[in-house]
């Protein structure tokens, strides 16, 4: 079953919720939860995958952590998210 098939089944069940058996609804919801849980796969071109792998290795992070970090940095730099700044009076544990 492909992703669109699951989405179509869920939309159809939502349209006729009173007619769907509890067992069928339970199966559909479990499938949807499984797909969401395993939806971490984001494919990139080979050169981008290589760079991500190398960078993640250098920084001791996972590929998905690197993607989250890069997206957050890009969004902050392009003012889609607020930039978090250190408070001048805050404790930096010996780091500037």
Image (cartoon, rainbow, N blue to C red):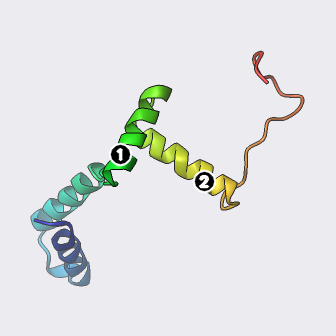
For label 2, the crowd category at 10 Å Cα-Cα, with few meaning under 14, some 14 to 19 and many 20 or more, is: few
Question: On the rendered structure, is 59 left or right of 1?
Answer: right
Residue at (24% x, 56% y) in the render:
35
Quarter placement of the N terminus:
bottom left
What residue sits right under mark 1 in the picture? 49
Give the mark toward the camera: 1 or 2: 1
Compared with residue 15, is residue 72 higher up or lower down, i.e. above or below?
A: above
Residue 56, position as x, y percentages in the image: 44, 33
Is residue 19 something one can see in this rendering? yes
Question: On the rendered structure, is 73 left or right of 12?
Answer: right
Q: Secondary structure at mark 2?
A: helix
In whole angstroms, how far apart are the C-alphas of marks 1 and 2? 18 Å
Residue 87, position as x, y percentages in the image: 84, 35
Of residue 17 and residue 4, the one placed in the foreground of this image is 4
Disc ID at residue 36: none
Residue at (41% x, 41% y) in the render:
52
Of residue 2 and residue 32, the one placed in the foreground of this image is 2
Compared with residue 75, is residue 63 higher up or lower down, i.e. above or below?
A: above
Is residue 60 something one can see in this rendering? no
What residue sits right under mark 2 in the picture? 74
How many marks the image carries: the answer is 2
Residue 18, position as x, y percentages in the image: 20, 80
């Amino acid at each position: 079953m492909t992703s669109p098939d699951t989405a179509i089944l869920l939309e159809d069940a939502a349209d006729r919720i009173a007619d769907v058996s509890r067992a069928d609804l339970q199966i559909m919801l479990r499938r949807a939860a499984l797909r969401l849980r395993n939806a971490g796969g984001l494919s990139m071109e080979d050169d981008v995958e290589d760079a991500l792998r190398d960078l993640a290795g250098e920084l001791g992070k996972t590929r998905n952590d690197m993607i989250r970090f890069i997206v957050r940095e890009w969004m902050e730099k392009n003012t889609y998210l607020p930039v978090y700044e250190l408070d001048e009076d805050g404790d930096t544990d010996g780091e500037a």
